[in-house]
């Protein structure tokens, strides 16, 4: 399976991704996790990304595309993209990349969650895990960036006939069942 998880920060993509990749035995590709690993390893790329991430902005397309291409190539049994693409330029590059590989996307799952719930979740995560970008000011900025740059992907993938919406509010297991139903229908 070749799947994209689309949704605002804190909509549950990372949480649900863990179960999906286990169930379907596909590779989990989270650009957020990759960037955080670069930051904590103190690499040159991580140094460039750190301040942007802490301010709630998007890291440059060049950096993100450079990180993801080889990993998509290597994911022979399928992949789950989590947090990528995040704007129209990334989506267009992804389409080109997958066309070259003759492995087009099959499904885009959009997590529908209201912003009030998102702010509540991320503030709670900030208190529990201390992630630098989970404070109220940065969360507002991330949501504004999402609305401006990422939300247009809903229409982009709807036009391609690949988008399925899942209500992302409720308990984690129930949302997991909704997602499973959507994946089974797309197989
Ligand atoms: P990400 O790591 O993608 O950060 P995120 O969007 O906050 O994570 P996610 O949405 O997966 O969190 P989840 O719902 O699982 O990106 C971080 C930064 O990296 C970006 O701001 C950007 O700077 C950079 N970046 C990443 N990708 C990029 C790209 N492609 N281009 C440019 N820049 C990029 O979890 C949220 C919380 O909700 C958790 O605490 C979880 O426990 C909780 N939760 C989940 N489901 C729940 C439920 N059903 N009910 C209650 N709580 C729930």
Image (tube, rainbow, N blue to C red):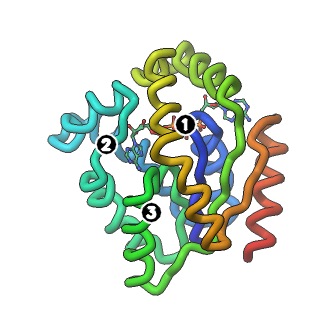
Q: Residue at x 60, y 45 (%)?
A: 7
- Please, what secondary structure does the residue beneath circle 2 have? loop
Cα separation, mark 2 vs mark 3, equals 15 Å
Decide if ligand 1 comes within 8 Å of the CB at mark 1: yes
- Foreground pick, 142 / 122: 142
Reading the image, the residue beneath label 1 is 9
Q: Are marks 2 and 3 in contact (CB under 8 Å)?
A: no
Q: Are marks 3 and 1 in contact (CB under 8 Å)?
A: no
Earlier in the chain: of badge 2 and badge 3, it is 2
Q: Where in the figure is residue 46, as x and y percent of width and height?
A: 24, 39
Above or below, comparing residue 170 to residue 90 in the picture: above
Q: Where in the figure is residue 166, as x and y percent of width and height?
A: 76, 51
Q: Is residue 94 left or right of residue 139?
A: left
Cα separation, mark 3 vs mark 1, equals 17 Å
For label 2, count other residues whose C-alpha is less than 10 Å away and answer few (under 14), some (14-19) or many (20+).
Answer: some
Q: Is residue 131 left or right of residue 127?
A: left
Decide if ligand 1 comes within 8 Å of the CB at mark 2: yes
Above or below, comparing residue 56 to residue 120 in the picture: below
Decide if ligand 1 comes within 8 Å of the CB at mark 3: no
Marker disc for residue 59:
2
Earlier in the chain: of badge 3 and badge 1, it is 1
- Please, what secondary structure does the residue beneath circle 1 have? loop
Marker disc for residue 91:
3
Task: Quadrant for the N terminus, please.
Answer: bottom right
Cα separation, mark 2 vs mark 1, equals 14 Å
Q: Quadrant of residue 58?
A: top left
């Amino acid at each position: 399976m070749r799947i994209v998880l689309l949704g605002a920060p804190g909509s549950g993509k990372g949480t649900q991704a863990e179960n999906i990749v286990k169930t379907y035995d596909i590779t989990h590709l989270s650009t957020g996790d990759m960037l955080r690993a670069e930051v904590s390893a103190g690499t040159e790329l991580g140094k460039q990304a750190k301040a942007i991430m802490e301010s709630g902005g998007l890291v440059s397309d060049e950096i993100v595309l450079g990180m993801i291409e080889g990993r998509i190539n290597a994911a022979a049994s399928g992949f789950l993209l989590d947090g990528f693409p995040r704007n129209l330029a990334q989506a267009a590059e992804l389409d080109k990349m997958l066309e070259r590989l003759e492995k087009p996307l099959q499904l885009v799952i959009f997590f529908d969650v209201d912003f009030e719930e998102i702010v509540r979740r991320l503030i709670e995560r900030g208190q529990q895990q201390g992630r630098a970008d989970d404070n109220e000011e940065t969360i507002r900025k991330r949501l504004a960036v999402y609305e401006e740059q990422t939300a247009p992907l809903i229409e982009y993938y709807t036009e391609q006939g690949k988008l399925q919406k899942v209500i992302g509010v409720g308990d984690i297991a129930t949302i997991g069942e909704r997602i499973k139903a959507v994946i089974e229908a797309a197989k």
